[in-house]
Amino acid sequence: MSAGRPRQTLSLFDAVAIIVGLVIGAGIFRLPSIVAGNIDSGTLIVAVWFLGGLISLIGALCFAELATAYPHPGGEYHYLSRAYGRDCGFMFAWARMSVVQTGSIALLAYIFGDYASELLPLGQHGVAIYALGAVVALTALNVLGVRQTKAMQNLLFGATLLGLACVIVAGALVMSPVGPSEAPLPAETGAGGGVGTSAMGLAMVFVLLAYGGWNEAAYISAEVKDGPRNMVRALLIGIALVTVVYVAINLIYVQVLGPAGMAQSDAVARNVMHAAFGPAGSTFITLLIMVVVLASLNVTILTGARTNFALGQDFRMFGFLAHWSERGGAPVRALVLQAAIAIGLIGLGAMQRSGVETMVEYLSPVFWLFFLLTGLALFVLRRREPERTQPFRVPLYPVTPALFCVTSAYLLYSSLNYTGAGALAGVAVLLLGLPLLFVARRQPAAA
């Protein structure tokens, strides 16, 4: 086992770039139309995107306390292990390795492949070929080391914000709505006269899915310079920046297309760019989405391998993963294993007609289950370790973390109640970790 350890090489700017890259993905280009399909009021559409940022900020405050009190490359794995014991930590690490993180990598890779194939088709399996190429290339970049990875992320981060700014400016150029029946930001709802609770709740599921990913910042907490102060700043700045972008871009969508036009569109950003610049605008937005997805994929690969590294440190069964390359500053073996599982999922998706939707169903219930447990861990650790130094304490405790837990519980329920067979498959794979846990418990802890 290598004696290498994570080093504090990430600046505040690096951390913000990673957080923004984790959050701003293809969701902001695909999900607003689904949200508009549930809410027929422009005012409410913009409001729910603001509310999503507020809820994410509440969650970020909870994670900021955990990340600053317990800086560790294992992130949530470390918090859950301290709060509930090694068994829970093992199951979480298994879930990330087999379901959540690798499923997210495969999902993002497929989205990249979809858009790349629009520009340069490679035949029947072109999407899968592009997806495999993206995973292999970005994993290789991460293996080279964290300096190369953060340099690429900063470049993609800048390109992402520049591209989104172009969409907002383009929308401002064609601000008038496309039809008189789609007046911008109406104060009242549509013909139905109201928005039902179930419709609003379902809309929030998709809004929060678009905001998802900021929690991954916990996995770089041990690598951020001046960690306690900069982790809090990075989370707050990152979420605030994403919220401003999301609210602004949805305001543009509403003003240009109207709620009905958004609901009928499968590519709202492309429609806005086409209205402003014609076919050239459509090509631009396709390239932008590819850049955004690559940024998300890059940091998802980076953070996912950190959990596998932490798992190898604690369990002899996976001890081979506890190797940290001093030369590059990266968990090389954990990265390689993660890529191998993601490639397997991509291969599985290649045999399905709806690979993207299946992957969303596959990882959602498991993701929200452990999100809920992490929120509850804040209460457990505060009570169990009152003497622990806490550079940052979540404001308005216990109300703030309680709101976070209630939201997570609702989304866990929704992900099980409104999805299909993919959700059951994800839960089944999670349960496969129980026999492995039984074997791991009979082995001594890793040295």
Image (cartoon, grey):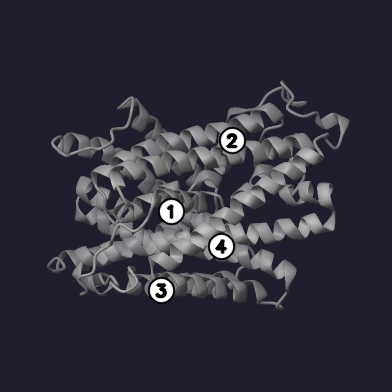
Residue at left offset 58%, top offset 71%: 131
Is 36 rendered above or below residue 75? Answer: above
Give the labeled residue for mark 3.
144
Classify residue 443 by image quadrant. bottom left
Q: How packed is label 2: few (under 14 Cα within 10 Å), some, or many (20 or more)?
A: many
Q: Amino acid at mark 3?
A: Leu
- Whole-angstrom CA distance, mark 1 to mark 3, is 17 Å
Labels 2, 1: front one: 1
- Whole-angstrom CA distance, mark 3 to mark 2, is 38 Å
The disc, 3 or 2, on the residue closer to the chain's N-terminal end is 2
Give the labeled residue for mark 1.
14
Residue at left offset 32%, top offset 51%: 225
Classify residue 109 by image quadrant. bottom right
Q: Taking 304 as reference, is 27 left or right?
A: right
The disc, 1 or 3, on the residue closer to the chain's N-terminal end is 1
Residue at left offset 40%, top offset 52%: 216
Q: Which label is found at residue 251?
A: none
Give the labeled residue for mark 4.
294
Q: Amino acid at mark 4?
A: Leu
Give the labeled residue for mark 2.
49
